């Protein structure tokens, strides 16, 4: 995998961290559109926790991609 691609994906993951609440709201709207009210209710009840989990996953992904990008460059 190209080093440039790894760094690009890492930067994309870092850019998505502040957008996490909007992504979760979009997911809730999608579940409501599918008429999955139970799934939308679960996401609404635990909204802050899901946003924190999503931000943590994106940060870990960005760090891992940067690490592998540097490791492949050496």
Image (cartoon, rainbow, N blue to C red):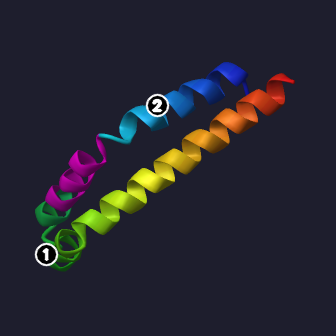
Query: Quadrant of residue 51 in the image?
Result: bottom left
Residue at position x 72%, y 23% from top?
2
Residue 67 belongs to the span the image colors magenta:
no
Residue 27 belongs to the span the image colors magenta:
yes
Looking at the picture, tell me which residue is in the foreground, 60 or 22: 60
Percent x, y of residue 22 = 21, 46
Per the rendered image, the range of residues in magenta is: 19-29
Percent x, y of residue 8 = 55, 24
Say whether disc 2 or disc 1 marks the residue closer to the N-terminus.
Answer: 2
Give neighbour class at mark 1: few <14, some 14-19, many 20+ (Cα, 10 Å): some
Residue at position x 13%, y 75% from top?
37
Residue at position x 31%, y 48% from top?
20
Q: Which labelled disc corresponds to residue 12?
A: 2
Q: In this view, does 9 lie to the left or right of 33?
A: right
> Disc 1 marks which residue?
37
Callout in the foreground (2, 1): 2
Percent x, y of residue 47 = 23, 66
Q: Is residue 32 above or below residue 54?
A: below
């Amino acid at each position: 995998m190209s080093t440039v691609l790894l760094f690009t994906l890492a930067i994309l993951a870092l850019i998505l961290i502040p957008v996490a609440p909007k992504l979760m709201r979009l997911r809730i709207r999608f579940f409501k559109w599918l008429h999955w009210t139970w799934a939308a209710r679960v996401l609404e009840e635990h909204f802050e926790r899901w946003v924190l989990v999503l931000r943590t996953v994106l940060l870990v992904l960005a760090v891992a991609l940067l690490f592998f990008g540097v490791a492949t460059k050496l």
